[in-house]
Amino acid sequence: MSSTPDLTSSVYSQALELIASVEPRIAEATRQELADQRASLKLIASENYASPAVLMTMGTWFSDKYAEGTVGHRFYAGCQNVDTVETLAAEHARELFGAEYAYVQPHSGIDANLVAFWSILAHRVESPALAELGARNVNDLTDEQWETLRRRLGDQRLLGMSLDAGGHLTHGFRPNISGKMFHQQQYGTDPETGLLDYDALAAKAREFKPLVLVAGYSAYPRRVDFAKVREIADEVGATLMVDMAHFAGLVAGKVFTGDEDPVPHAHVVTSTTHKSLRGPRGGIVLATEEYAPSVDRGCPMVLGGPLSHVMAAKAVAFAEARQPAFRTYAQQVADNAQSLAEGFLGRGATLVTGGTDNHLVLLDVSSYGLTGRQAESALLDAGVVTNRNSVPGDPNGAWYTSGIRLGTPALTTRGFGHDEFDAVAELITMVLENTQPGTTKAGGPSKASYVLADGVAAKVKDASAELLDKHPLYPGLELS
Ligand code: DSN
C-alpha cells in the first residue's frame, strides 16, 4: 500500500472530532477499529483494506440522494449527478472485466445474486411466456394467466456447488432463499482429491437439467475451468451464472485469464466489490447483452434505492484496479497463497485439495484434534483473525466445522510477501499445536471450548507485531 499523504491524517482527524461532538462512542469505536486492524494478522479470505480514496468517496452527500431506477430513467427528480456516477462506475467495470454490460447498484453479493436470479427467470421464463400470450407486461394478464406464470416462475431448477465443497449459501443452499425459490440440487468435489469433478458435474446436470447452473465459490482453493462449465451448461440448456465474489481481483488483475476468466464464458457474472477487488462494500452484476434489460430492472425489482455514495466509490476502486499496479498486486495475492500453503505443508498440515492456486487455503484442523471453532478462537486470542469453515463432508457441520479458511488479499495489500507468509504459517502452526480441546460443563468433550498453552498467545502477538510494523496499514495516517 503506498504512503498516505498527510492530508488524509488531517481529514480523518477532523472528521472524527466532528463525529465525537455528536456521539463520542462512535468516534472512539472508529479509532479503535483502525487500531485493531493495524495490530492483527487479517487472514479472512473475503476481507481487504480499501484505499483512503475509496473510503473517503463513501462519506459524501451522495448518501442523501434517492435514485431508484437506472441512468436516465429514474423514479426521482434531480439525479443528474448520480447518473454521472453510475455511468462512470459501469463504464470502468465493463472495461476492467471486458464485459458487455455492467450493473453497479447491488448493495452486496447476496443482492447481486438475487438480481442475477431474477434476470435469468425474467429472460428465460417470464419474457417468453408474455410473448406467447401476446402481453407486454404482467398487468396485461388475466388473473388465471398470471397464476400460471407465477407457478412457472416458481418451478425452476438450480444446480450449484454445495456449501461444504466451497460453494456459497446463495448457490441453492436449502436454508437460503435461493434454495427455496428454486428446486435445487448441489454438486460437490471428488471425495479423494477434493477437486471439482467436471464429469460428475456434467452427469448431474444431464440428469437434473437445471435452468441455472451456478459456478464460483467462497472456500474452494482452486481455479475453475469456466469454458468446461459453459460446455456443460450449453449441453443441458442452462444459463451459466458465475459468482466470482472471492476471486474478482484475480480476474481484474489478469491472473485468471482464458478458460479461468468467467466473463467470456458465463451469461451472467456476479461479484462483491470489497474482497480481492479491494473496493467498497457492495456488489455488481456483469452480463451479456441479452440479459442486460432484465438485470437493469434490479432496482426496484429486488433492490432498494441505489447507494450512490458506494457506486461512486466503486468507480474509484475500478479505476484503481485498471492501473498496472493492481496486476502486480493480484499476482502477489496468488503467489502469497502458494507460500502460505507451502509453509503449512512443510510443517505437516493437511490442506483441502493439497494446496491452492487462488487466493485462499483451507486448513483441515482435525489433524490437531480441534474443531474449526476451537482453532478460530485460539487464533483470535493470539491476534490472528481467520474464520472457521466446513471442509468437504464435514463431520462437525457448518457451525463448529473442521476447517479454517485463510486468505492472502488483505496482508498482501499491506506488503507481505513470501517470507512473511511463511512466518504466518509458522505462527498459526504454533497456536494450533499448543491448543487442546476443552470440556463441557458436564465434563464431556466440547467442540467449542479450548485451552491454549500459557505464553503462546503473547509470543505469537510479539512476532506478529514485528511483521506488521514492517508493513504498516495506511502508512502516514496518524490520528490526532
Ligand atoms: N461472507 C463472504 C465470505 O466470507 O466468503 C461470503 O458471503
Image (tube, rainbow, N blue to C red):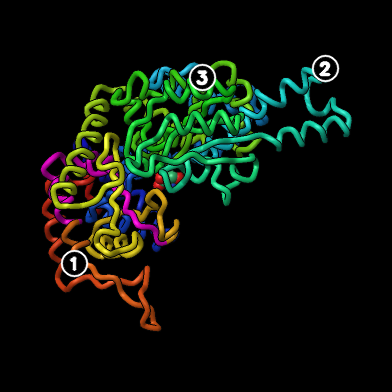
- Above-or-below relation of 315 to 372: above
Residue 41 picture location, percent across and down: 23, 52
The residue tagged 1 is 434
Quarter that holds the C terminus: bottom left
Marks 3/2: CA–CA distance: 28 Å
Quarter that holds the N terminus: top left
Q: Secondary structure at mark 1?
A: loop
Q: Nearer the viewer, mark 1 or mark 2?
A: 1
Q: Secondary structure at mark 2?
A: loop
Residue 305 picture location, percent across and down: 60, 37
* Residue 77 seen by the camera: no
Residue drawn at x 39%, y 82% is 441
Q: Secondary structure at mark 3?
A: strand
**Does the magenta segment cover residue 421?**
yes
Q: Which residues are magenta?
A: 400-428
Residue 39 falls left or right of residue 56: left
First along the sequence among labels 1 and 2: 2
First along the sequence among labels 3 and 2: 3
Number of the label disc, if any, that sits on residue 134: 2
Residue type of the residue flagged with mark 2: Gly
